[in-house]
């Protein structure tokens, strides 16, 4: 049976770059909300010698995720899922929209894919180094478990917390950081749950990367660049390689952790604050 690798948010950015580092004997399914983008991605992958398919999916809808799972499982055994779909504060949308896509979308992807995945398979959830910027005392960690039991209350509590920020961009930024902090927490939770079935779950947190999203966020998100080891943004292909290697079956002992791939900027700013 053929091995299938599914990449949400695979029509652009680091998701599409990750596909280009996957072994060529896998069937690649890239998904996102915009078919024209996915078709272009599939063309690129086919030109590189991949067997690739496009499937639209809005990860903030469980029904849509179920359709993606059925599509992929029909093609072969789903071995790798890279959940790179996400939206950021500078994009159109609301705090709720950010939380629905980045946080609840991760719940739907992990829950629905884990139903068809077997031992030796892997889910990589893409978080962000902004998961690390909030002081722990203002993170409503106790509300996180509600994502699986009472979605509306989960959203209400996280939106209320993000409303503590002043200004629309800052409130959306706060919601984004919370959504990504949740992704780290949830991936870890799933790792210990699905680990019993032999499914490996890892989150990966990029720093500021020069994708469409990263370029949009450069003005405000760029404040960490001077604290990174090389004082630069990351390249999409560097993150693509990191995602593909974390998702590789040969990396079988990497589970239940967050891989912080941010050029050292989170640690750089910590050191700077300590010296001050
Ligand atoms: N670039 C950075 O600086 C940076 C830093 C930290 C973390 N990240 C995270 O890295 C991931 C990839 O981002 P990127 O930088 O590669 O940006 P990107 O090129 O904008 O990729 C994000 C992809 O997600 C898709 N998407 C958005 N909402 C979706 C939804 N509801 N359902 C399915 N797909 C959806 C988008 O396609 P459609 O709009 O067509 O659906 C897009 O292809 C995101 O999770 C992001 O939060 C990025």
Image: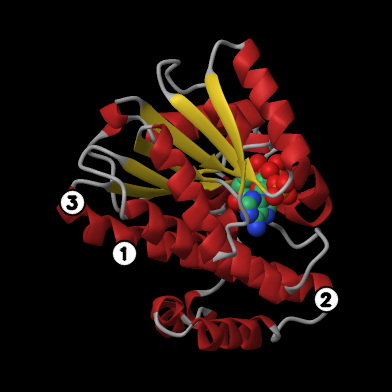
The front one of 223 and 97 is: 97
- Taking the image as drawn, is residue 86 in sight? no
Secondary structure type for disc 3 = helix
Q: Which mark is residue 207?
A: none
Vertical side of 117 occupied by 168: above or below? below
Question: Of label 3 and label 2, which has the lower sequence position?
Answer: 2
From the top left corner, tell me how far across and down residue 160 is, in percent: 64, 88
Tag 3 residue: 197
In this view, the mark in front (3 or 1):
3
In the rendered image, which quarter is residue 88 located in?
bottom right
Q: Which mark is residue 189?
A: 1
Tag 2 residue: 168
In this view, the mark in front (2 or 1):
1
Question: Of label 2 and label 1, which has the lower sequence position?
Answer: 2
Residue pictured at 28% horizontal, 55% vertical? 191
Which residue is the extreme one toward the front? 74
From the top left corner, tell me how far across and down residue 53 is, in percent: 57, 30
Quick check: 229 left or right of 173?
A: left
Label 3 and label 1: CA atoms lie apart by 14 Å
Label 2 and label 1: CA atoms lie apart by 31 Å
The front one of 220 and 61 is: 61
The front one of 239 and 102 is: 102
Residue pictured at 57% horizontal, 67% vertical? 179
Vertical side of 177 occupied by 21: above or below? above
Q: Residues within 10 Å of mark 1 (few under 14, many from 20)?
A: some
Residue pictured at 40% horizontal, 84% vertical? 142
Secondary structure type for disc 1 = helix
Q: Are marks 3 and 1 in contact (CB under 8 Å)?
A: no
From the top left corner, tell me how far across and down residue 166 is, in percent: 79, 82
């Amino acid at each position: 049976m053929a091995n299938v690798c599914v990449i949400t948010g695979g029509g652009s950015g680091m998701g599409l770059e990750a596909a280009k580092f996957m072994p060529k004997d896998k069937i690649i399914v890239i998904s996102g909300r915009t078919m024209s983008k996915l078709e272009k991605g599939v063309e690129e992958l086919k030109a590189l010698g991949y067997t690739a398919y496009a499937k639209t999916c809005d990860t903030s809808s469980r029904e849509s995720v179920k359709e993606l799972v059925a599509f992929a499982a029909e093609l072969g055994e789903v071995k790798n899922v890279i959940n790179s779909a996400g939206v950021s504060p500078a994009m159109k949308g609301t705090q709720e929209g950010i939380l629905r896509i980045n946080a609840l979308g991760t719940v739907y992807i992990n829950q629905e894919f884990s139903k068809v995945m077997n031992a030796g398979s892997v889910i990589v959830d893409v978080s962000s180094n902004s998961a690390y910027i909030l002081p722990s005392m203002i993170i409503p960690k106790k509300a996180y478990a509600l994502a699986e039991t009472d979605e509306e209350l989960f959203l209400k509590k996280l939106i209320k917390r993000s409303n503590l920020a002043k200004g629309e961009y800052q409130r959306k930024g706060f919601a984004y950081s919370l959504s990504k902090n949740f992704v780290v927490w949830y991936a870890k939770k799933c790792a210990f749950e699905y680990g019993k079935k032999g499914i490996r779950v890892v989150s990966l947190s990029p720093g500021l990367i020069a994708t469409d999203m990263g370029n949009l966020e450069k003005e405000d998100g760029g404040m960490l660049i001077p604290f990174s080891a090389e004082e630069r943004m990351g390249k999409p292909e560097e993150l693509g390689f990191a995602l593909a290697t974390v998702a590789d079956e040969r990396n079988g002992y990497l589970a239940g952790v967050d891989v912080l791939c941010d050029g050292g900027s989170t640690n750089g700013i910590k050191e700077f604050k300590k010296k001050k």
